[in-house]
């Protein structure tokens, strides 16, 4: 009897051990499946992210070059301006912060509707001014009598009137530099304004003016001791 009892106990113990092993074998299998699914999901997400990143990098390496136009004085003064441009028959708009004294050919990289654009600035010319960096250049008219005798003239600049003292015997094409009246940059640098004199001859002279000019020529002839013929 004792032998049968021991045999029964051993059988029960063996069955319990077998069940325990079955449970232990099942749990790792479930965990393994779970991790495999999660890794597959993460791999899929990484692949999508990588594709999107590659697309962005590809677009950045090959941006769409678009010329944009900016007025001469807008480039001199700077500010925020709205630009419109066409690409593939689609109108795009973007606002750019233009610094005073921006150079022609300046590039701005912007994104619109997942497209990278390389906007190339083209600055319009002005009929009276031209610019080199922060330096401005222009011509200004000087009356004949002021050029000879000297005097004061008022020059209308883009940033206010300038009073200029003209010395006697100013030559045509002579340059006058007005300090700190060029382009003012955000850093506080201020360029100069260089004016080239254009002496304007009188028109529709009166008889008295013609007579005075003839007397002037006679005096000049005597000074130079040369010959000068006139009617």
Image (cartoon, rainbow, N blue to C red):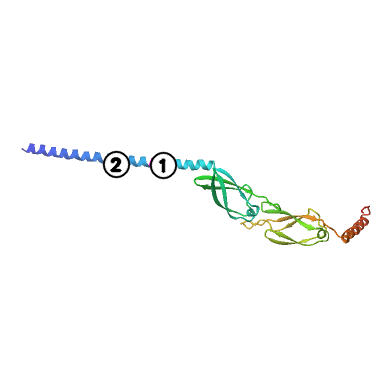
Tell me: 117 left or right of 6: right
Q: Assign the N terminus to one quadrant of the image.
A: top left
Q: Residues within 10 Å of mark 1 (few under 14, many from 20)?
A: few
Could you tell me which secondary element the residue under label 1 belongs to? helix
- Magenta part, dominant SS: helix
Place residue 164 in its image quadrant: bottom right
Disc 2 + disc 1, Cβ < 8 Å: no
Classify 10 Å Cα crowding around label 2: few (below 14), some (14-19), many (20 and above). few
In the rendered image, the vertical position of residue 78 relative to residue 1, given as above or below: below
Residue corresponding to mark 1: 46
Horizontal side of residue 26 vs 88, given as left or right: left
Residue 213 numbered mark, or none: none
Which quadrant of the rendered structure holds the C terminus?
bottom right
Residue segment shown in magenta: 42-50
Name the residue located 51 percent from the left edge and 42 percent from the top edge.
Answer: 59
| Mark 2 or mark 1, whichever is nearer to me | 1
Badge number at residue 31: 2
């Amino acid at each position: 009897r004792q032998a049968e009892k021991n045999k029964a106990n051993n059988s029960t113990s063996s069955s319990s051990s077998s069940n325990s092993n079955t449970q232990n074998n099942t749990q790792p299998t479930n965990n393994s499946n779970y991790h495999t699914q999660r890794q597959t999901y993460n791999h899929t997400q990484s692949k999508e992210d990588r594709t999107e990143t590659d697309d962005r990098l590809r677009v950045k390496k090959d941006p769409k070059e678009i010329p944009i136009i900016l007025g001469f004085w807008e480039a001199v003064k700077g500010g925020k301006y709205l630009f419109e441009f066409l690409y593939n028959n689609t109108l795009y708009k973007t606002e750019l912060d233009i610094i005073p004294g921006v150079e022609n050919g300046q590039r701005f990289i912007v994104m619109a509707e997942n497209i990278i654009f390389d906007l190339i600035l083209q600055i319009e010319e002005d009929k009276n001014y031209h610019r080199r960096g922060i330096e401005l250049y222009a011509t200004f008219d000087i009356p004949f009598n002021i050029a000879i005798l000297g005097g004061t003239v008022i020059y209308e600049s883009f940033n206010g009137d300038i009073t200029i003292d003209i010395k006697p015997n100013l030559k045509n094409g002579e340059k006058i530099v007005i300090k700190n009246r060029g382009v003012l940059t955000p850093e506080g640098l201020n360029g100069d304004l260089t004016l080239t004199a254009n002496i304007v001859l009188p028109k529709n002279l009166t008889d008295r003016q013609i007579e005075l000019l003839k007397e002037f020529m006679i005096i000049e002839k005597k000074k130079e001791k040369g010959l000068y013929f006139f009617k």
